[in-house]
Image (cartoon, rainbow, N blue to C red):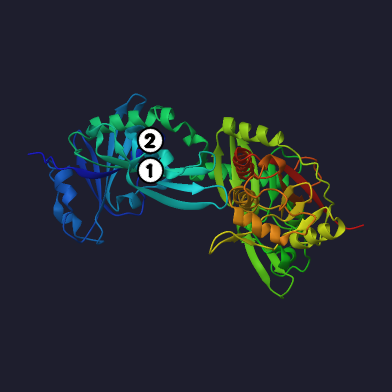
């Protein structure tokens, strides 16, 4: 008699070109059981007693349970099912225990579980999400709420948060109760071998549906790439772009994390190299290793070092591959390499962000070029020493609650320009600059004590005390983001995720009422 108990299922969709004999890893010793009209069960041989799902999912199958008692202590199995779908025959893999480890990763369709979940769940009954913030840091986090809610309850930034998975209550209880997934779909439902094919057809329809765009239209803006063959193809284009000077793709090196520029003597490539460079540049790297075959393996082995000016040590080091930023076209898609990860960017989103950046207001602030040997603090102090219009507030944090402080800005001018300055770097570096501007601008507008503490740091010529502190008019102020760059191009080119962060910062600051602009500060040798 069939067992009607529910089963916890993990379901994978196998890529169309993969044969059923190529789904599992070759080295795994398995017990194979053909289940007529249903599928093929592969059990990794095990020493322990048969797990409960054997009887609940395969109630009518004659299985030799003694075959479990051979190798490992963690029961694992994969049930492969061929299903006739609207797109022809497809193979599904339902895994039990550690069965997911038996499947070749390149055999599965990426994001099958995530997209299917988006179409199955009630958009007003979400419980948790996993996301990666692409703004200040590429930080992975999981957020839960005490009761069921909508995406806005999680504080999602639709331009800067890459949602990787979610948990939600299913709209139709026929498909289960709660659903979640990324590559695989996870549900607890009353499916067993007798009705699996019928239900898999339904899950496939959910996967193919675009209904999710009615509630989560922004979800496809950014996708992290995990497909090895695609990554291999993109890396091949990257290597070709590095080797060919006339390549159309954008490829450059940048510092992948925030560094203390006050203690930076320079940068070098390779631990035994003595020549120091003022920044990370692709041409310098290629020149140092002109005799080497710069391939992917070399990029992942070679190190870039940040050298201390106060000690005979390296402040930090990074694999050169992690320092590469690249924008590459492939099959009419736009891919970005950032922080050692490849991402697919929705073309409409990419073009909208790029258009906004190309039209971003440019500050007319008269700031001098930055001597290449100066760090940010030295430059800011030098500017204020040379020009009485400016006061340097760099390295002068302002307390805004019992435990927190922030620099109001780096330079403050008599005509109410609030200037934040940072040397060019990766998205993580520049996004830190834009985030600081938003936080500072919000506090300046909303916190009277914060303004008083700023006022205490300013000379009489720059103080805001003549303005009623409770009636700050934000439109009188301009927040300027200054980026020190050695690029000789007129347009300051920054990473895509920094353009997204800058766009978001501008929107927020304009809501506060500020004027916002961008300033390129040229870094060059003196004389």
Image location of residue 494, percent across then percent down:
69, 45
| SS type, badge 2 | helix
Q: Residue furthest left?
A: 1
Q: Residue furthest top?
A: 86
Label 1 crowding class (10 Å Cα cut-off): few <14, some 14-19, many 20+?
A: many
Is label 2 in contact with label 1 (beta carbons under 8 Å)?
yes
Which numbered circle lies on residue 337?
none
Image location of residue 96, percent across then percent down:
26, 49
Q: CA distance from mark 2 to mark 1?
A: 8 Å
Up-down relation of residue 506 to residue 323 (above or below):
above
Using residue 406 as the reference point, say whether residue 38 is left or right of it: left
Image location of residue 247, percent across then percent down:
72, 39
Query: Is 346 or 78 nearer to us in this picture?
Result: 346
**Upstream in sequence: badge 2 or badge 1:** 2
Q: Residue at x 62, y 49 (%)?
A: 431
Label 2 crowding class (10 Å Cα cut-off): few <14, some 14-19, many 20+?
A: many
Q: Residue furthest right?
A: 527
| SS type, badge 1 | strand
Q: In terms of image quadrants, where is residue 387?
A: bottom right
Where the N terminus falls, by quadrant? top left
Query: Is 473 or 136 nearer to us in this picture?
Result: 473
Query: Is 458 or 177 nearer to us in this picture?
Result: 458
Using residue 324 as the reference point, say whether residue 172 is left or right of it: left
Which numbered circle lies on residue 166?
1
Q: Residue at x 71, y 44 (%)?
A: 477
Q: In terms of image quadrants, where is residue 353?
A: top right
Q: Which residue in the protein does label 2 denote?
A: 118
Is residue 407 visible in the rendered structure shown here?
A: no
Using residue 221 as the reference point, say whether residue 293 is left or right of it: right
Where the C terminus falls, by quadrant? bottom right
Image location of residue 8, percent across then percent down:
24, 45
């Amino acid at each position: 008699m069939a067992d009607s108990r529910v089963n916890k299922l993990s379901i994978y969709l196998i890529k169309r070109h993969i044969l059923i004999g190529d789904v599992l890893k070759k080295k795994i010793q398995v017990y194979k059981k053909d289940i007529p009209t249903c599928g093929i069960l592969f059990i990794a041989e095990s020493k322990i007693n048969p797990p409960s799902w054997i009887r609940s999912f395969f109630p009518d199958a004659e299985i030799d349970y003694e075959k479990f008692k051979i190798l490992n202590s963690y029961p694992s199995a994969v049930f492969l099912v061929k299903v006739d779908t609207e797109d022809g025959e497809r193979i599904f893999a339902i895994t039990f225990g550690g069965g997911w480890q038996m499947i070749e990763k390149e055999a599965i369709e990426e994001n099958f579980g995530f997209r299917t979940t988006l179409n199955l769940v009630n958009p007003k009954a979400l419980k948790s999400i996993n996301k990666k913030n692409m703004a200040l840091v590429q930080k992975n986090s999981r957020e839960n709420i005490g009761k069921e809610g909508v995406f806005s309850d999680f504080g999602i930034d639709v331009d800067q948060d890459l949602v990787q998975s979610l948990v939600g209550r299913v709209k139709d209880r026929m498909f289960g109760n709660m659903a979640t997934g990324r590559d695989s779909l996870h549900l607890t439902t009353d499916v067993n071998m007798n009705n699996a094919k019928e239900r898999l057809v339904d899950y496939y329809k959910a996967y193919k549906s675009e209904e999710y765009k009615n509630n989560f239209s922004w979800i496809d803006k950014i996708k992290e790439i995990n497909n090895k063959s695609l990554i291999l193809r993109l890396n091949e284009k990257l290597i070709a772009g590095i080797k060919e000077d006339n390549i159309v793709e954008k490829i450059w090196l940048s510092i992948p994390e925030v560094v203390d520029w006050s203690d930076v003597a320079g940068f070098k490539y390779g631990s035994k190299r003595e020549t120091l460079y003022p920044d990370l540049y692709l041409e310098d790297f290629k020149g140092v290793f002109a005799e080497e075959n710069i391939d992917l393996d070399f990029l992942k082995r070679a190190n870039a070092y940040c050298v201390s000016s106060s000690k005979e040590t390296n402040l930090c080091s990074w694999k050169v591959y992690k320092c590469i930023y690249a924008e590459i076209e492939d099959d009419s898609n736009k891919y970005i390499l950032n922080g050692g990860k490849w991402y697919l960017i929705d073309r409409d989103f990419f073009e909208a962000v790029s258009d906004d950046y190309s039209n971003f207001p440019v500050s007319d602030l008269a700031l001098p070029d930055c001597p290449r040997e100066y760090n940010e603090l030295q430059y800011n102090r030098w500017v204020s020493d040379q020009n009485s219009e400016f006061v340097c507030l760099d390295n002068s944090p302002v307390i805004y609650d019992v435990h927190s402080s922030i620099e109001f800005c780096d330079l403050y001018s008599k005509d109410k320009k609030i200037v934040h300055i940072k040397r060019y770097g990766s998205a993580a570096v520049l996004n830190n600059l834009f985030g600081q501007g938003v936080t500072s601008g919000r506090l300046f507008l909303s916190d009277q004590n914060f303004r008083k503490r700023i006022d205490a740091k300013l000379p009489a010529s720059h103080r805001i005390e003549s303005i009623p502190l409770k009636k700050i008019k934000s439109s009188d102020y301009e927040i300027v983001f200054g980026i020190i760059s050695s690029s000789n191009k007129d347009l300051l080119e920054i990473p895509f995720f920094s353009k997204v962060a800058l766009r978001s910062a501008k929107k927020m600051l304009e809501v506060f009422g500020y004027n916002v602009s961008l300033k390129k500060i040229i870094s060059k040798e003196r004389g």
